[in-house]
Image (cartoon, rainbow, N blue to C red):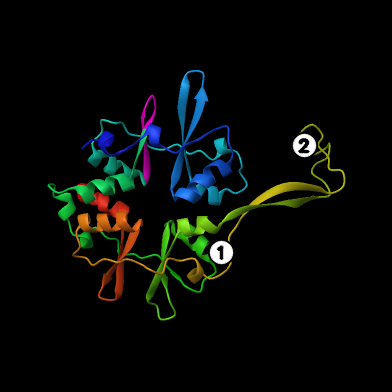
Amino acid sequence: MNVADAMTAREELVTVSLPGTRDDALEHLQERAFSSVPVVKETDDGEEFRGLVSRETLIERPDENQLALLVEEGPTTTREASIEDAAALMVAEDARRVPVVDGQLEGIVTVTDVVRTIAEDQDGTAGDVEVGGLAIHTVNAVYAGTPLTVAERELFYARTPYGMVLDEAGELCGILTEVDVLDVAHVVEGEAETGESIANEDSEWMWEGIKAVGNRYLPTRNVEIPAEPVREFMTSDVVSVSRTRTAREVARLMLDSGVEQVPLLRGDELVGVVRDVDLLEALR
């Protein structure tokens, strides 16, 4: 199977255009739970693909409002590439969405698209691989009583888009994801005092004799996240799998449940996590 058989074509894509603001992208990421959205620009020669803007970047750079400065470059692929090559690229580049580009944006192939091919595969061997050998066994976890503001920082520093939520007994009671945080995060505007003076005519770094007259205030932006405990925002109805489930079965479970990761249990004990990107290893 080629990328063209699995991708979302350009005419079906949700994109944002330059010039624009962070809110243009935030609206799509909140409503559709995408990890990123393509950015394009109309020119005299037609549409140009400029890159992607991710939900992580929007949270981590609240002071930047211009869409052009939030765009990130990344790997691309072509329609003719095999789905196995696309999967390998996603794993190598830690990319959930890979634009399909041939001069201009032709589509997007995502981790979910690859997972769907595994779910629908009836003849290949990839779908028969047991997930016990694909799962990761270092589990990122947060306490159910942790303020969401702290939990968001924990996800950021752990560089994971999820946290398995543990209760007072240390048992699994839910899952918190980046999407949950983004759903309740919003940008607030404010002002910060600069002080009595910015520069004087003798300052070596002074540009054109800039001086402060009285107190000055600079506009600021910050992402406001509720401080209530994680248990109020987590998903408590968590689907889980055992190590003997196949990649095909887990792929179908993820698609049906709309989740990107599921806990791996041995009995009632949490022993690992199967992420959608882990299923891509079954194609190698």
| Residue 25, position as x, y percentages in the image | 52, 42
The correct choice, above or below, for 70 with respect to 115 in the image is above
Residue corresponding to mark 1: 149
The correct choice, above or below, for 15 with respect to 27 in the image is above
Task: Looking at this view, name the residue that lies furthest to the bottom.
Answer: 169
Q: Can residue 146 be seen in this view?
A: yes
Mark 2: give few (<14), some (14-19) or many (20+) Cα within 10 Å: few
* Label total for image: 2
Depth order, front residue of 108/190: 108
Disc 2 is placed on an element classified as loop
| Residue 26, position as x, y percentages in the image | 53, 46
Q: How far apart are marks 1 and 2 (CA)?
A: 38 Å
Q: Can residue 95 be seen in this view?
A: no
Which portion, as a residue range, is magenta? Answer: 95-106
**Mark 1 or 2, nearer chain start:** 1
Residue at figure coordinates x 27%, y 36% from the top left: 3
Q: Is residue 249 left or right of residue 184?
A: left
| Residue 257, position as x, y percentages in the image | 33, 59
Q: In this view, does 161 lie to the left or right of 153?
A: left
Mark 1: give few (<14), some (14-19) or many (20+) Cα within 10 Å: some
Task: Looking at this view, name the residue that lies furthest to the right.
Answer: 214
| Residue 245, position as x, y percentages in the image | 20, 62
The correct choice, above or below, for 254 with respect to 201 in the image is below
Disc 1 is placed on an element classified as helix
Give the dominant element type of the magenta stretch: helix, strand or loop: strand
Residue at figure coordinates x 30%, y 41% from the top left: 89
Residue corresponding to mark 2: 206
Residue at figure coordinates x 58%, y 32% from the top left: 19
